[in-house]
Amino acid sequence: MNLRLTLLTAGRVLRQIRGDHRTVALMIVVPCVLIGLLAWIFNATPFVFDHIGPALLGVFPFVVMFIVTSVATLRERTSGTLERLLTTRIGKGDFMAGYALAFGFMAVVQALVATGFAVWVCGLDVAGPIWLLVVVAVADAVLGTALGLLASGFARTEFQAVQFMPAFVLPQFLLCGLLVARDALPDVLRWVSDALPLSYAVDAMKTITATSDALGDVGKDLVVIVGWIALALVLGSLTLRRRTP
Amino acid sequence: MVNNSYAVEVDHLRVTRGGRLVIPDLSVRIPTGQVVGLLGPSGGGKSTFIRAVVGVQVVESGTVTVLGEPAGSQGLRHRVGYVTQSPSVYADLTVADNVRYFGRIAGVDEAAVQEAIALVDLPSHATARVENLSGGQHSRASLACALVGRPDLLVLDEPTVGLDPVLRRDLWNLFGRLAAAGTSLLVSSHVMDEATRCDRLLLMREGEFLADTTPAQLLAETGAPDAEAAFLALIDRAASTAARSGGAGGSAA
């Protein structure tokens, strides 16, 4: 790993994103629209929005970043730029970390805008510190990026890459405690839920909403999420092969 | 320049791709400071050979030594420039941004970036996004990304395919200038006319070299008027040799 090469790659990825105004708009606007829609749906029962809203603030960046990253990296694989890059000084770690850093930066912007919109426009009621909400949202987004990088290793076409989204994300969504509290799940499903990273993301968001002194519990959730990010990045870099058959 | 007598040394290379034996047993020495043309029909194993030289091909057996080190090793990463067959640059970035990215990876300064863009004659399009360029400009942008690091060995897979004659001539002139300055070049092409622009020729067919020679020698040995005819003569000769040895084997059995 080389910090200079990692930063070069992150800069290049950001320059690519910056040139694609529509993608930038989708990344920033879509979470806000969805949160606004949710607030509107539960207009008559604001306590439901206060319950679900923060959890979704964790889920949206995860989903968006997963799709964007898996397609972007797959494009590198199919266009030949990855093969070329791997003949240069760039290491697999530089490549992975460069992408994680670039999309992590986008995640910060997205999380700031989405959280601000939820709290100040939609009137989301949060007991804990709002900055912590942003931190967890960013961690979720980077988690989406890391899993997207991993998933792209198993996709041959962009069609497949997009199909991986429901395959990777929906089971986690169903089991994360948003639809049914995790305690109420059948034993086997609860164990699975305990292993999946999105469960911890949603737990953390719920804790921040409910308690003002959330830092300790949220910290533990964040450790699990960061562990998953590291694991996904390491597994993802294993799918990058300098030599291919 | 490092004092190696050969840019590339290949011994008993054997490569299988997708269950097909593409290169059965290949050995060759490629000298430094020359433009070496790798010519032959499509599907003859040129790209596979090139991928083995830059070290991105899984090889079954044999050794490939580049500038004195095993192909693809860490020490070669900044000494070998590789251009894949399809132009592998970022279509959503400008020419300058692409060249700058690959240049910075190689550790060169902005002057070298501008110089590489000038070498492929793209200064007027430096700020244009690659996706808005023509096919020829696209592949020249890809070439600039390999030139920018000032590699000792340039490996180019079909760099002139689909280009107009003027552009092709300009590129071959550029290759000649680079070689004169000490760069070794391995350039593949399926256009036989381009053989005359090379210092040395490797004629490849079905994973084997039919000839490892100079353009002048090739014409002298085959008595053919041009490279294309010479290549066909060599194929016929190889076929008749194979038929004879096949016939001999048949009578012995």
Image (cartoon, rainbow, N blue to C red):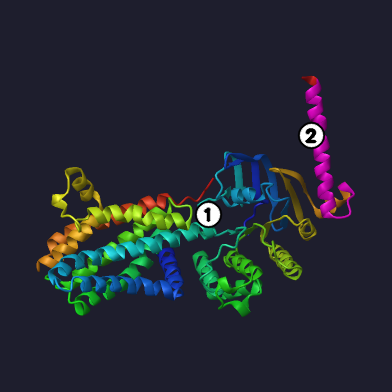
As displayed, is residue B28 above or below residue A152?
above
Chain ID for label 2? B
Answer with left or right where residue B35 lies relative to residue A198.
right
Q: Residue furthest top?
A: B253
Residue B217 at x, y percent in the picture:
84, 51
Q: Quadrant of the N terminus of chain A?
A: bottom left
Label 2, label 1: how far apart the Cα atoms are: 42 Å
Q: Secondary structure at mark 2?
A: helix
As displayed, is residue B131 above or below residue B197?
below
Tell me if mark 2 has few (under 14), some (14-19) or many (20+) residues whose alpha carbon lies within 10 angstroms of its own.
few
Answer with left or right where residue A158 lies relative to residue A29.
right
Which quadrant of the figure has residue B76? bottom right
The magenta stretch spans residue A176: no
Tell me if mark 1 has few (under 14), some (14-19) or many (20+) residues whose alpha carbon lies within 10 angstroms of its own.
few
Do dots 2 and 1 share one subunit?
yes
Q: Which residue is mark 1?
A: B75
Q: Which residue is mark 2?
A: B242
Residue A142 at x, y percent in the picture:
31, 62
Q: Are marks 2 and 1 in contact (CB under 8 Å)?
A: no
Q: Is residue B246 visible?
A: yes
* Residue visible at 61% across and 40% down in the picture: B20
Which quadrant of the figure has residue A56? bottom left
Q: Secondary structure at mark 1?
A: helix
Q: Amino acid at mark 1?
A: Gly
Which mark is in front, 2 or 1?
2
Answer with left or right where residue A18 lies relative to residue A139.
right
Q: Is residue B66 visible?
A: no
Magenta stretch?
Answer: B222-251
Chain ID for label 1? B
